[in-house]
Amino acid sequence: MIEIKDKEDCCGCWACVQRCPKQCISMKEDEEGFLYPHVDSTQCVNCGLCKKVCPVINQAHPHEPLSVTAARNIDEIIRRQSSSGGIFTLLAEKVIKEGGVVFGARFNDHWEVVHDSTDTIEGIAAFRGSKYVQSSTGDCFIKTEQLLKQGRRVLYSGTPCQIAGLKRFLQRDYDNLITTDVICHGVPSPGVWQKYLSEETAHQINKGRFVYFRPFRKDEFRIINISFRDKYTSWKQYSFTLSLSKTNECGESLCYRRTREENIFMRGFTSDLYLRPSCYQCPTKELKSGSDITIGDFWGIEHIMPHLDDDRGLCCLLVNTERGQALVNSIDAVQHEANYKDIIRYNPSLVRSSEIPSKRMEFFSGLPKYGMLRTTERLTRNPFILRCKNAIHNSLKKLGLR
């Protein structure tokens, strides 16, 4: 029977829940808004399968990729809609065109992040773009196993710990399975995300700061789109965008867009305030997840291969297995050979876990009393001198003097 005594020992992959033959494990939310497995001891038969599939207990060994390239989609529309270079879409399209199924993370009707599947080209759009919230895996591992046994080809995408969980869940290798993970900084709390979304939506509507001159009720609007990585400004200086539409017949819409430095949720995320405890000692760094392909942003490309930098998005594409290489070779993408050490240098999250911030406990203790916006603003505010320097820098930039 699996017991979570220290929360950093659970990455929330759901492998134990889905593998339990008695279905006596359920996921329950803790005070930080993360889900953890809880066992009904009256139903447990101590088979040990929950421990056998746990990617934290059963960690793999680090390794280096077979090949590394700077890559992008040749379709500029898809590239613009993607967080970086649009490579995932090409991989997914190839698998679906061959009769396969793709799993990925999408928003549900409540703007929670969940894992789901699609076997249509149109369905890939929901999986496109980064979502900086831990997704709920549900029963996707079970569905994947069923599809694989039916002979269907499956492309499963997720965070490294989710891919490691899937691999442990399956307990065998399938030739018709391709796994792809992302270079992961850490996963924020779903509970904190929902608090942020509720507070920010109400705050922006009531301020009437869009195109209106009177306060509005929250129920007058519905969220129609969220983008954590909006390239409206550029790829490197991306923005968080929240789009709302009025529920009446007029169909009026509102758009809240802020850079990652200005947006409260992104500031808290990049400050590591509300990452899952396991993220501070991630069990799947250094390509230990067992994925066939790893995708991330090719940060630092302006220093390494400046001729490729158009600030519209570029992927670093790491191929870890021969099976992954075969799929990458079959797609029509622009690729340039790159160096693994350069990826690590500018995207250290590939090999290093985030450090626990000193203000993390202060954040969660202040959250119930002061709310998400106020607590995060206070704990991530830059010193006065730095704020002045940034203001001067931005003014000079707008005037074209820098």
Image: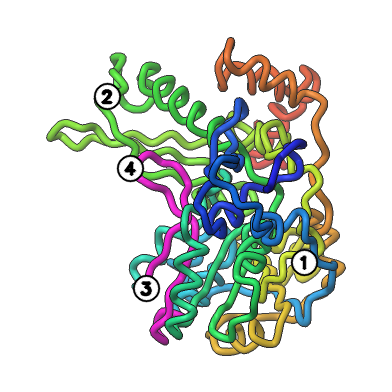
- For mark 2, what is the residue? 219
Q: How is the image coloured?
A: rainbow
Q: Which residues are magenta?
A: 94-118
Image quadrant containing the C terminus = top right
Instruction: Give above or below for 369 relative to 87.
Output: above
Secondary-structure class at tag 3:
loop
Nearest to the eye among marks 3 and 4: give it: 3
Element carrying mark 2: helix
Disc 2: CA contacts within 10 A as few (<14), some (14-19) or many (>=20): few
The residue that mark 3 highlights is 119
> Going from the N terminus, do you reach mark 1 or mark 3 first?
3
Q: Residue at x 65, y 72 (%)?
A: 171
Say whether residue 72 is left or right of residue 53: left
**Disc nearer the start of the sequence (3/2):** 3
| Residue to which mark 1 is pinned | 287
Tell me which label, 2 or 4, sits earlier in the chain: 2
